[in-house]
Image (tube, rainbow, N blue to C red):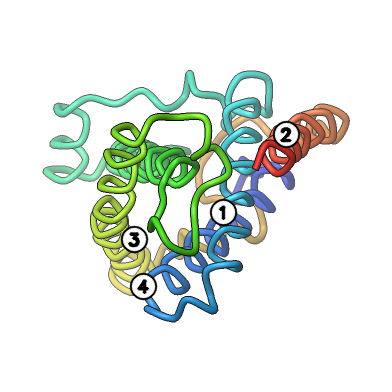
Amino acid sequence: MRSRVWDLPLRIWHWLFALGVATCLLTGLSGDIGWMQWHQRSGLLIIGLVVFRVGWGIWGSRYARFQYYRVSVAAIRDHFLRRLDPQVHTPPGIALAVALFSLVLLQASAGLFATDDIFNEGPLRRYVTDAFAGRATWLHHRVHWIISGFVVIHLTAQLVYGLWFKDPLWLSMVTGRKTVEAVRTRDHFRRAALTAAVAVLVVSILVVAG
């Protein structure tokens, strides 16, 4: 049975988040200073998306809420040791999503204060001490390697589930449907519009502050 578990706002957020992370990684690792403007723009996009996702995790659609993102080591172990009933959120999927989201949040937040002391600096650099900016820059130049590792794990999992288990998980983030018996998800467009407006406001404040 295929049920509609992912709402449209969440699916749009997912692909924008993927685009933002990919753009940040590519422009940041390119070594070309000419790409730094796009690096900063994609970083601000990610900040806005993070704000949206936090709001959507509180008052969004049913399965987007944080209450469904609880996991334990035992649950992850059991998932790999034996095939369990189909779930909207698999335990390893929850762990990976939470870890990746947290790392991107850390990376983007550090970028707000980071500086190369020559050409580029985050929009909030002027509001912190040199020591704080130095620590933020140190983090910003290292956390992206961990993020890259988790992205590889995520993409590998998609291949394994799609080719080995014949369960193309990525497709559910296109159609919103997954092979699982679950309560049908609503889109809640008004809530999504309000949450998006808050995210845009936060990014606008950062742009003005910078």
Residue 174 in the image: state x and y as whole percent: 64, 61
**Identity of the amino acid at label 1?**
Phe
Q: Earlier in the sequence, mark 1 or mark 4?
A: 1
Of tags 3 and 2, the one toward the viewer is: 2
Q: Are marks 4 and 2 in contact (CB under 8 Å)?
A: no
Q: Earlier in the sequence, mark 4 or mark 3?
A: 4
Label 1, secondary structure: give it: helix
**Residue at mark 2:** 205
Distance from disc 3 to disc 2, alpha carbons, whole Å, reads 30 Å
Distance from disc 1 to disc 3, alpha carbons, whole Å, reads 12 Å
Count of picture labels: 4
Residue 121 in the image: state x and y as whole percent: 49, 52
Distance from disc 4 to disc 3, alpha carbons, whole Å, reads 15 Å
Image-based side of 54 in relation to 196, left or right: left
Q: Is residue 36 above or below residue 95?
A: below
Q: Are marks 3 and 2 in contact (CB under 8 Å)?
A: no
**Residue at mark 1:** 17
Q: Quadrant of residue 41?
A: bottom right
**Residue at mark 3:** 151
Of tags 2 and 1, the one toward the viewer is: 2
Residue at (41% x, 51% y) in the render: 115
Distance from disc 1 to disc 4, alpha carbons, whole Å, reads 18 Å
The local crowd at label 1, few if under 14, some if 14 to 19, many if 20 or more residues have their Cα within 10 Å, is many
Q: Earlier in the sequence, mark 1 or mark 3?
A: 1
Q: Are marks 2 and 1 in contact (CB under 8 Å)?
A: no
**Which quadrant would the C terminus be assigned to in this image?**
top right
**Residue at mark 4:** 29
